[in-house]
Amino acid sequence: MAEIVNWAPVRRSSAQGFAMRAPRTASRCDAAALASIDVDQWRDLADRAVEPNAYNLADWELPLDATARDRTNASALAARAASSADPHAGTLIGLIPVVSAWRAYRIPLPVLVSADPYGTLSTPLLDHDVATEAAAMLLHKARAIGQHALILRNAALDGAAMKALTAVLERDGLRPHILQTHVRACLDATQDPDDLLRDALGVKKLKELRRQRNRLAEQGEVSFQVARSPHDVVPALETFLELEASGWKGKRGTALLQHDGDAAFIRRASPALAERGQCEVVTLRAGTTPVAAAIVLRHQDHAFYFKLGVDEKFAKFSPGVQLTLDLTRHLCADPAIALADSTAHPGHPMIDPIWRGRLTIGDVLLPLRRSYVVPLAKAAIALRGQMRSSARRAIHAIRKRQEKNT
C-alpha cells in the first residue's frame, strides 16, 4: 500500500508564516492496496467506463504493480454502489490507482497522485451510467483519509471523466487547477487512410517513402503482421523486446528487456490483454527479418500506441515510419476503432507529422477542501519542474559536447 504522508502546519508569528512538522505515516488509510481489487469487477467496470483508458485496465495495472520498475505497491481509491447488505461490497463504479505525493514528487504534503501507469494516461475509470456519482465518491474517499488534494497526471482534459470530476468540484464551490498541459498526436481512425496520409504527408513525401519501401524489399518481401491471440502475441512480443533493446533505448538503459521487473510485467500483461482482445503486437518484416515492431493496446473504441522498436541497421529505409503507415491503414480499416492515441511526447518527430489529430493532456490538481495545502502543492510542483528542466538542459548540453568530442 502506498505510504500516505500527513503534514500539519505549526503556527509561528505572521512574519515567519508556517513551518512543518516531520512527516508521519497515517495511522489509518482506507485506500485499498491495488492488488486487493476484485479483478472481475475491475474488468466489468472497464467495459462500462465513460472514457477509454487501456493503461488503467486490470490486466495492465496488476502486472505493472507486481514487478515494474519504480511502479509497484500502489494503492487505489475505489467507489462502489451502495449495497443494503454490505456497503463495502457493492458494484465497483470508479477506480483511480494512487500513490502519495511524497512518492510521486518527494513533496511532503497530504496529497494523493495518480500512480504512473507506464503509458502516459491516467484518466480514471468511471461507470458511464453514474459517472458523476462515482467521481463524487472517489473524491470523498480521498477526503475521508485526510487528503487535501488529488493530482491526476497525464489526464485527458477534455474527456468525460474530467468533466464529471469538475462538475463535482463545482458543486462544492471548488475548481480544478491545471498544473501543466500539452497536446499530443492522435489518429481519427474513421477516415479513409489514403486520404488521411496524403493530407498529412503530401504526395512528395509519400513518394519518397514508397521508394524507401521498395529498397527495403530488396532485402526480402516486405510484410506487415498482426499478432492478436495470446499464442501469437508471446513470440511477437519477444521480437519487439529484442528490437527495442537493440536501439537507442537500449543504449540509454530504458528498454523494457533491460530490467527484469519491466520484462516480467510486459510478458504477463500482453498475453493477458490479448486474451480479451485488448492487445496486438504488430511487426514489419523484410523477408524473415523483423525491422520494426510495436505494442498496441485497445480499450472500447480506442487504440493506444504504446511502444515502438526498430532495427537501426535499416534506418535508411525509415522502418518505424513504414510500420506506422501500415498500422494507420490497419486501424482505419477496423470498424471497432474510432480513435488511436499515440501516447507520445508532444512534438514527437515521427508520429506528429503522420497522425495530425491532437489530444489535450495535462496534470490537474483537484482540491478536496479549501486548504493551505493547495497553493503549497502548486508552488512545490512548479519549483520541482523548473529544477528538473534545468537539469535536463545541463545533461543535454553535456551529451552534445561529448558527441562533438567523439
Image: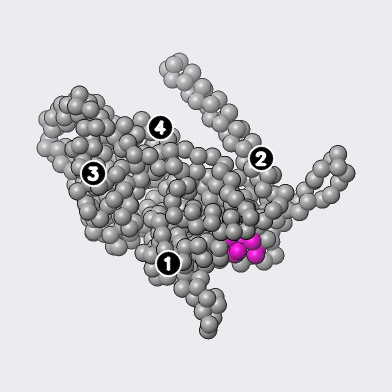
- Residue at the bottom extreme, as displayed: 85
Tell me which numbered mark, 3 or 1, is placed earlier along the sequence.
Answer: 1
Give me the C-alpha separation between circle 4 and circle 1.
Answer: 36 Å
| Mark identifier at residue 379 | 2
Q: Nearer the viewer, residue 179 or 248?
A: 179
Label ID, residue 129: 1
In percent of width and height, residue 3 lies at 62, 57
Q: Amino acid at mark 4?
A: Gly
Work out which quarter of the rendered image holds the N terminus and state it.
bottom right
* Side of 4 where 62 appears, left or right: left
- The segment highlighted magenta reads 138-145
How packed mark 1 is, by other alpha carbons closer than 10 Å (few <14, some 14-19, many 20 or more), is few
Q: Residues within 10 Å of mark 3 (few under 14, many from 20)?
A: some
Of discs 2 and 3, which sits in the foreground?
3
The residue positioned 63% from the left and 55% from the top of the image is 173
Q: Which mark is residue 347?
A: 4
Query: Which residue is depicted at the point 68% across and 61% down?
Result: 146
Query: Which one is nearer the viewer's eye here, 185 or 212?
Result: 185
The amino acid type found where label 2 is placed reads Ala
Mark 3 in CB contact with mark 1 (< 8 angstroms): no
Q: Which one is in front in this view, the residue at disc 4 or the one at disc 3?
A: 3
Q: Amino acid at mark 3?
A: Gln
**Residue type, mark 1 in image:** Asp
- Image height check: is 394 above or below 4? above
Looking at the rendering, which quadrant does residue 105 occupy?
Answer: top right
Residue hosting label 3: 191
Residue 311, can we see it?
Answer: no
Of badges 4 and 1, nearer the viewer stands: 1
- Tag 2 and tag 3, C-beta contact below 8 Å: no
Q: Earlier in the sequence, mark 2 or mark 4?
A: 4
CA gap, disc 2 and disc 1? 37 Å
Nearest to the eye among marks 2 and 1: give it: 1
